[in-house]
Amino acid sequence: MLNSLVNFFTAHIPYWPLVCFSLLILAGFNLPVSEDAVIVLSAGVTLSDSSLVIPTWISLYLGIFISDIMVYWWGYFLSKGMFQFKKIRKKLTENKIRLVAKTLDDYGFRTFIVCRFIPFGVRNTLWMSSGFVGLPFKKFLLYDSIAALVSCSTLYHLIRFIGEGASVVYKIIGIVLFVALIIFFVFMIRHVIKKETKFFEDENKQDLNFQ
């Protein structure tokens, strides 16, 4: 399936880095574009053309980073009442906002690292909530620039490692990043889950006391 898609895009699209960048920018408008799918497909394209390895990686990183910034500002503008998009507003429930605010306060940068590797809307919820709860923009830029670099590079090099055309250098990079990621991710996710569980337990207790 992946090979078929790669063959189609390489045959019909003249410059892939520009395409993957554009797709990721569309994701910043809350359109259903999968960041992971774009990275995987991009890595597959570079296996057939080594000259695209660096330009594609740069395009992916910039597309992801700029898209995240766009989502942050969507959340900020929503908090100020400048937009009233019901579909977006549904993602920012009161419990989610309070949980994100508390998690950012407790874990800060580590929250960004963990959530970058959790798909199905978790990332966008965090970026949007960061803007909504007023996380300083400079801090968001710092956190997200590093987290995006880690996640994009890890998945990109991992797919290239799996591909038959991957060089020894990329195989080494892929292995090191992937092993480090798994160790760090397992460690952090345990702490986040414990914190979320305690948060909702406290919320339930408060609701019962109020009743």
Image (tube, grey):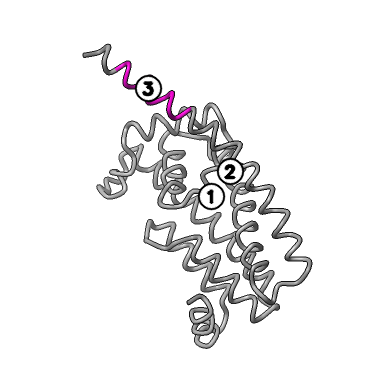
Seen in the image, is 190 located left or right of residue 92? right
Q: Which residue is labeled 2 in the image?
A: 113
Q: Which quadrant, please, contains the C terminus?
A: top left
Residue type indicated by callout 1 = Phe
Marks 2 and 1 close (CB-CB < 8 Å):
yes
Q: In the rendered view, tell whether residue 198 sits above or below residue 89.
A: above
Residue sitting at 53 percent across and 40 percent down? Answer: 137
Residue type indicated by callout 2 = Ile
Residue sitting at 69 percent across and 60 percent down? Answer: 174
Seen in the image, is 139 located left or right of residue 132? right
State the SS at label 2: helix
Q: Residue 205, which numbered label?
A: none
Q: Which residue is labeled 1 in the image?
A: 117
Residue type indicated by callout 3 = Glu
Seen in the image, is 210 located left or right of residue 58? left
Start-end of magenta stretch: 195-206
